Image (spheres, rainbow, N blue to C red):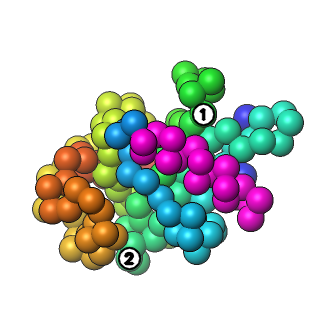
């Protein structure tokens, strides 16, 4: 499987995939405009026919921190290592950019722990990361789990 940068023609598919899981309460929704504006953050996996079947975004928060978000894999492709491949690609990109630490806020902490993330209290993360949270319908009662990953310790 090949992880590659998202293209403009992936945006509507990313939006549909992410919001399908959001509709089930498994992740937060993403607006179409947000995906267009942050397309350079997204990595995707396509099937043999070229259709996008998995995605993730690596969003830079500060000089030493990036967020892994919008990780979604088409249901038919679960348990095939695509989520892990996307997270690994985020680690590689973080290293290349010189960003020493990544974090995520998730409803699936077990998956991220298997990828090497460690659970932390949300208060350990800088306030800067909460800028997006103000528009969340769950704010200020966030029920996601915060996890961090030390990129400098990765192989």
- Dot 1, crowdedness within 10 Å: few (<14), some or many (≥20)? some
Total tally of numbered discs in the picture:
2
Identify the residue at horizontal 83%, vertical 42% (top origin). Answer: 50
Find out whether the residues at labels 1 and 2 contact each other: C-beta distance under 8 Å. no
Judge from the rendering whether residue 59 lies leftward or rightward of residue 133; answer left or right.
right
Quarter of the image where one finds residue 6: bottom right
Give the Cα separation between the discs numbered 1 and 2: 30 Å
Q: Which mark is residue 147?
A: none
Is label 1 or label 2 in front? Answer: 1
Q: In the rendered structure, which segment of residues is drawn in magenta?
A: 6-23
Where's residue 98, x and y in %?
Answer: 50, 69
Residue 80 seen in the current view: yes
In this image, 1 relative to 124: left or right? Answer: right
Q: Counting residues from the N terminus, which is met first, the one under dot 1 or under dot 2?
A: 2
* Identity of the residue drawn at 58% across and 44% down: 17
- Is 28 located above or below residue 109 in the figure? below
Residue 75 location (% of width, % of height): 57, 28
Q: Position of residue 93 (x, y in %)?
A: 58, 60
Task: Please say whether residue 112 is visible from this viewpoint.
Answer: no
Report whether 37 appears left or right of 131: right
Q: What's the magenta bit mostly, secondary-structure-wise?
A: helix
Which residue is at the front of the view, 73 or 80?
Answer: 73
Magenta run includes residue 13: yes
Is residue 9 highlighted in magenta? yes
Residue of label 2: 62
Q: Which residue is mark 1?
A: 74
Q: Is residue 85 left or right of residue 99?
A: right
Farthest-out residue, right: 49
Label 1 element class: loop
């Amino acid at each position: 499987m090949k992880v590659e940068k998202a293209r403009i023609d992936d945006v509507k598919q990313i939006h549909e995939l992410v919001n399908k899981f959001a509709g089930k309460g498994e992740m937060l929704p993403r607006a179409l405009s947000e995906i267009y504006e942050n397309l350079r953050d997204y990595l995707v996996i396509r099937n043999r026919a070229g259709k996008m079947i998995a995605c993730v975004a690596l969003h830079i928060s500060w000089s030493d921190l990036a967020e892994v978000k919008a990780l979604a894999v088409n249901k038919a492709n679960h348990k095939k290592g695509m989520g892990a491949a996307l997270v690994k690609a985020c680690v590689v990109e973080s290293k290349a950019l010189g960003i020493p630490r990544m974090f995520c806020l998730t409803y699936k902490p077990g998956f991220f722990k298997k990828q090497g993330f460690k659970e932390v209290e949300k208060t350990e993360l800088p306030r800067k990361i909460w800028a997006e949270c103000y528009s969340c319908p769950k704010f200020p009662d966030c029920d996601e789990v915060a996890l961090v990953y030390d990129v400098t310790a990765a192989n």
